[in-house]
Image (cartoon, helix red, strand yellow):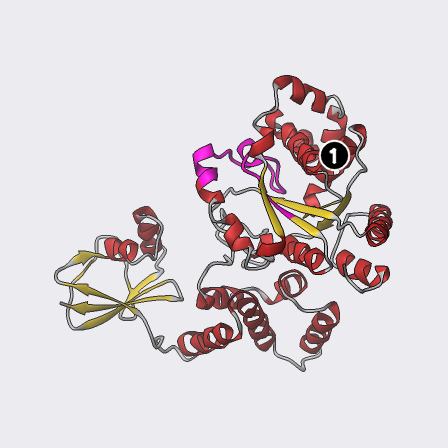
């Protein structure tokens, strides 16, 4: 267990937590202090978990907000459970958007879940992490079990939730299966016998439902810690694969760096506070320098981009990504190394983009061309019918950061 005092541990673990009101925050702070004292006295680590629905194959920076907090619990000697929501993701729970999330098929979720844990280990210690899948127990619940869970909650409690309240007031549809999401997440806490659960601020209702269910079934109610959302690279909407404003933890260092540099200045604080290893004091000092004109926002953003790459890929990769950005984007030079493709005859540009791995599908490749995001030797490709005719050496650029050298052969 940690040699830190309870107050020191509490300060670390509560850092960044937000609940929407001070009373809830103080209640959870007191509950966590009590659990930490109990853990210290008994020598038994706290059981801490956070769930992640595999609705897409990639883990992005938005997911890592709670993962970093899980890592802090690990470093303080507590037991961390990384829960993959292979069943809850089937439900399509309510998000912070104005409607339900789309439902996924079991096959889609199984494919996405395959890489989730491995990506998470870029932050979490694999030796100290227990990985669980909630389909293992939720899929075995009977309809009678579900009725028993539902009996602990009222419709009024659900409608009081901000997301549901807005949709109800607007006359928008609220699907019955969305109510089940909170029941299933509450059951996860019961099944895992957790002391602490982490989540995003808009999930507080679900976490509190876990407390209620634990208490009803004779368990000590868990401590709930919720954290703000990380905005995407657009600086407005929450980071999401579906909106395309994300930075994936498994993306190449140059891609992470370049995407971070596209972040609006106004969103830097959100990223420094939630997506870096910086202390609050370090963040405040840097942002104060920006506000006072001592440090240019571009330089601050470079430090942010370097820190994000370093956290996942190491200092050397961060240095190389920074050099790549300056060479390609600031000096408008081509990167030192590019993948090479040999063409023996004319090939449609869409086929070249897709075969190079620059798009997930030919449909996406066509969209990139139509969005004027494709250049051949510096000239914008204006039609999806363009064929690349091999002659000497040419450079195909897709977006701002992907390059392919094409040679005649």
The residue carrying mark 1 is: 209
The 10 Å Cα crowd at callout 1, few under 14, some 14 to 19, many 20 or more, is: many
Position of 107 compared to 43: left or right? left
Res 175 seen here: no
On screen, residue 390 above or below 166: below
- Observer-nearest residue: 190 or 288? 190
Q: Residue furthest front?
A: 43
Magenta stretch containing residue 376, yes or no?
no
| Residue 136 sits in quarter | top right
x, y percentage for residue 122?
A: 54, 59
x, y percentage for residue 322?
A: 49, 75
Res 174 seen here: yes
x, y percentage for residue 106?
A: 47, 33
Identify the residue at image location x=55%, y=74%.
302
Task: Report the magenta residues as a range.
Answer: 81-110
- Observer-nearest residue: 115 or 341? 115
On screen, residue 145 above or below 118: above
Position of 369 compared to 3: left or right? left
Position of 397 compared to 330: left or right? left
Please count the marks in the image: 1
């Amino acid at each position: 267990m940690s040699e830190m005092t309870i107050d020191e541990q509490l300060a670390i673990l509560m850092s960044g937590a937000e609940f929407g009101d001070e009373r809830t925050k103080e209640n959870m702070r007191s509950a966590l202090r009590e659990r930490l004292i109990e853990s210290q006295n008994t020598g038994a680590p706290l059981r801490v978990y956070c769930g992640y629905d595999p609705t897409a194959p990639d883990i992005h920076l938005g997911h890592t907000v709670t993962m970093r907090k899980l890592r802090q619990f690990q470093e303080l000697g507590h037991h961390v459970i990384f829960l993959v929501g292979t069943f809850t993701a089937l439900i399509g729970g309510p998000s912070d958007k104005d409607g339900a999330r789309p439902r996924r098929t079991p096959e889609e979720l199984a494919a996405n879940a395959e890489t989730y844990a491995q990506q998470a280990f870029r932050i979490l210690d694999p030796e100290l992490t227990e990985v669980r899948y909630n389909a293992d127990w939720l899929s075995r619940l009977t309809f009678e079990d579900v009725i028993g869970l539902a009996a602990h909650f009222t419709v009024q409690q659900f409608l009081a939730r901000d997301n549901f309240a807005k949709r109800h007031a607007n006359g928008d549809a609220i699907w019955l299966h969305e109510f089940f999401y909170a029941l299933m997440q509450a059951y996860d806490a019961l099944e895992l016998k957790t002391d602490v659960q982490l989540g995003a601020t808009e999930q507080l209702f679900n976490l509190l439902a876990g407390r209620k269910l634990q208490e009803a079934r004779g368990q000590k109610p868990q401590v709930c810690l919720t954290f703000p959302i990380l905005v995407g690279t657009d600086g407005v909407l929450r980071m999401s694969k579906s909106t395309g404003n994300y930075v994936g933890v498994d993306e190449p260092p140059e891609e992470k760096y370049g995407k971070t540099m596209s972040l609006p200045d106004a969103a830097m604080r959100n990223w420094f506070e939630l997506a870096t290893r910086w202390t609050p004091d370090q963040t405040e000092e840097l942002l104060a320098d920006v506000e006072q004109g001592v440090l240019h926002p571009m330089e601050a953003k470079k430090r942010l981009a370097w820190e994000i790459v370093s956290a996942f890929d190491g200092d050397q990769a961060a240095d190389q990504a920074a050099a790549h950005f300056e060479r390609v984007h600031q000096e408008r030079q081509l990167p030192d190394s590019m993948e090479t493709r040999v063409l023996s005859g004319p090939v449609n540009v869409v086929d070249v983009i897709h075969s190079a791995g620059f798009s997930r599908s030919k449909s996406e490749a066509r969209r990139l061309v139509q969005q004027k995001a494709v250049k051949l030797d510096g000239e914008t490709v204006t039609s999806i019918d363009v064929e690349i005719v091999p002659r000497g050496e040419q450079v195909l650029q897709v977006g701002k950061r992907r390059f392919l050298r094409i040679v005649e052969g």
